Image (cartoon, grey):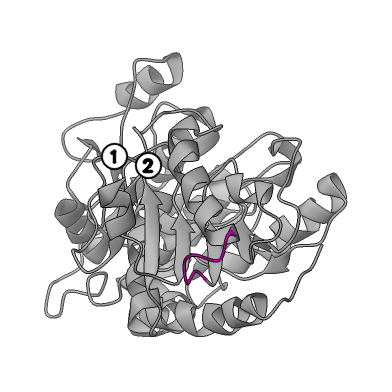
């Protein structure tokens, strides 16, 4: 309890997912990296976040953190509940100067405290969300996701994209010659991620491809690895963040052939935003919010099949990588994201509610 109270020096509570440890240096992006970026961004704008994160998380020393139980791969996130309950008791008794809670978790425990000003971010297709959504002030990543929330949950969500990247890290490598290779980043063992579609598009075009990500021993994972060799279709494995950056800076395009069951889709893409930050355009199947993430001809192309992906690999040569990078910074840098979020946080602290 002494450690817990010693960390209570902020005015914004940021509830991290309880599934994985938080770190600035995670290899593949995701919400866990985003929490680190977001907390630093809030501090840079004059706020003082307290991050509730699983044990073993690593944040900069200037960011107050409460280790709220072990990381548990369970979307109910039981590890974060006891410490959060203690904090909310203090908040509701007006003994702490907390202005609002930003709930980035999957289970949204802040909903149990409706008197607390809060913003709850939803991450997935609302069709597959847990049956008990947050009570109010729900934030969607995209217009697509907000519309799905309206259809399947019967509620309104405000579109306020939190997906951001460190523009000082994800940037082009000046003077480095680009390789004639594409890149796929994601789970190779998951059919929904579409690694085989990327492989087939590149094979048909005689285009070289690097595959980056984990590959468990599944039938799909084995089928992907059976396509790999040592030169044309190369499986790089789970690489470091530095190696991923190196590959993105030199890649012709990031291929993102995600293909979920009909009616579902991706609400956004951390990987795509980071790639665009290096000037690397993204080619994705037109599912979910990909038409909002990608601006055709500027930051990449939206396609609808492996053959179309092959055609887009040809077109992508005409994309100006400096303009792609500039647009990514304009939309997705931490500073740009904070400029969108701070007014809404202030509005929420003053009592704004939407349902």
Task: Residue 270: give x, y in percent of width and height.
Answer: 44, 57
* Residue for point 17% across, 74% down: 173
For the residue carrying disc 1, how many other residues have a C-alpha within 10 Å: few (<14), some (14-19), or many (20+)? some
Which circle marks residue 285 in the picture?
none
- Say which residue label 1 marks: 55
304 on left or right of 131: left
Eyeballing the image, is 260 above or below 49? Answer: above
| Near-viewer residue (352 or 130) | 352
- Say which residue label 2 marks: 68
Q: Residue furthest left?
A: 175
First to last magenta residue range: 93-98
Report how far apart the C-alphas of labels 2 and 1 lie in the structure: 6 Å
- Residue 285 belongs to the span the image colors magenta: no
Eyeballing the image, is 325 above or below 1? Answer: below
* Residue for point 66% across, 52% down: 113
| Near-viewer residue (30 or 2) | 2
Find out whether the residues at labels 2 and 1 contact each other: C-beta distance under 8 Å.
yes
Query: Which is more N-terminal, label 1 or label 2?
Result: 1
Eyeballing the image, is 64 above or below 152? Answer: below
């Amino acid at each position: 309890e002494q450690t817990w109270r010693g960390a209570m020096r902020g005015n914004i509570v940021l509830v991290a997912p309880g599934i994985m440890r938080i770190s600035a240096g995670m290899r593949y992006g995701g919400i866990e990296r985003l929490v680190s970026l977001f907390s630093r961004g809030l501090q840079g704008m004059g706020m003082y976040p307290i991050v509730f994160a699983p044990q073993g998380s690593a944040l900069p020393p200037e960011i107050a953190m409460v280790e709220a139980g072990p990381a548990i791969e369970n979307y109910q996130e039981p590890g974060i509940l006891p410490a959060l309950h203690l904090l909310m008791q203090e908040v509701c008794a007006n003994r702490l100067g907390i202005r609002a809670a930003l709930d980035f978790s999957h289970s949204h425990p802040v909903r149990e405290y409706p008197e607390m000003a809060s913003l709850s971010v939803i991450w997935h297709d609302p069709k597959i969300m847990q049956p008990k959504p947050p009570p109010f002030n729900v934030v969607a990543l995209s217009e697509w996701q907000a519309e799905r929330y309206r259809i399947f949950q019967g509620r309104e969500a405000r579109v306020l994209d939190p997906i951001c990247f460190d523009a000082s890290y994800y940037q082009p490598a000046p003077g480095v010659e680009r390789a004639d290779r594409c890149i796929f980043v994601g789970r190779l063992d998951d059919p929904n991620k579409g690694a085989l579609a990327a492989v087939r598009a590149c094979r048909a075009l005689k285009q070289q491809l690097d595959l980056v990500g984990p590959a468990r021993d599944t039938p799909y994972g084995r089928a992907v690895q059976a396509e790999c060799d040592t030169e044309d279709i190369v499986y790089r494995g789970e690489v470091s963040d530095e190696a991923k950056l190196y590959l993105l800076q030199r890649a012709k395009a990031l291929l993102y052939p995600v293909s979920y069951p009909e009616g579902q889709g991706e609400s956004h893409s951390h990987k795509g935003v980071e790639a665009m930050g290096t000037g690397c355009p993204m080619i994705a199947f037109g599912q979910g919010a990909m038409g909002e993430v990608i601006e055709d001809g500027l930051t990449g192309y939206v396609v609808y099949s492996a053959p179309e992906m092959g055609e887009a690999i040809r077109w992508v040569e005409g994309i100006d990588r400096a303009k792609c990078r500039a647009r990514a910074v304009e939309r997705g840098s931490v500073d740009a994201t904070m400029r969108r979020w701070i007014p809404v946080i202030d509005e929420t602290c003053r009592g704004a509610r939407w349902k």
